[in-house]
Image (cartoon, grey):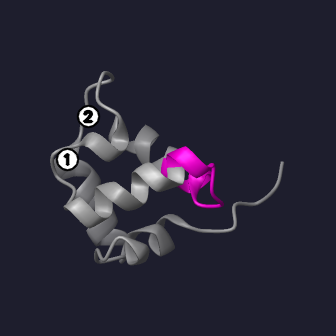
């Protein structure tokens, strides 16, 4: 299994969010549980730009996909 190119911290940076360990944990705690029927990019807590980036990641199977899937799992 290959090591992901990006980390959760780099994903948070890309999304324009604070990427410290504490901030990431606080974000997860504040926004979970995300209902199974809602796709990650459709969650109400994203800005338009953040949602667009996450949708693009999903649609293009970009190198961010694995770490975005990890974030998705953390929010469930």
Q: Residues within 10 Å of mark 1 (few under 14, many from 20)?
A: some
Q: Is residue 28 above or below residue 13?
A: above
Q: Which mark is residue 34?
A: 2
Q: Is residue 61 above or below residue 39?
A: below
**Residue 14 percent across, percent down from the top left:** 42, 75
The residue at the point 28 percent across, 66 percent down is 49
Q: Nearer the viewer, residue 11 or 51?
A: 51
| Residue designated by label 1 | 31
Q: Nearer the viewer, residue 4 or 40?
A: 40
Q: Quadrant of residue 74?
A: top left
The residue positioned farthest toward the right in the image shown: 1
Q: Quadrant of residue 19?
A: bottom left
Quarter placement of the C terminus: top left
**Residue 3 percent across, percent down from the top left:** 76, 60
Q: Main secondary structure of the magenta part?
A: helix
- Stretch of the chain drawn in magenta: 58-68
Check if residue 62 falls in the magenta segment: yes
């Amino acid at each position: 299994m290959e090591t992901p190119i990006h980390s959760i911290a780099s994903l948070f940076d890309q999304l324009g969010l604070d990427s410290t360990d504490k901030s990431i944990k606080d974000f997860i705690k504040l926004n979970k549980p995300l209902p199974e029927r809602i796709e990650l990019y459709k969650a109400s807590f994203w800005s338009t730009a953040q949602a667009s980036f996450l949708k693009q990641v999903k649609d293009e199977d970009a190198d961010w996909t694995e770490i975005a899937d990890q974030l998705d799992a953390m929010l469930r």
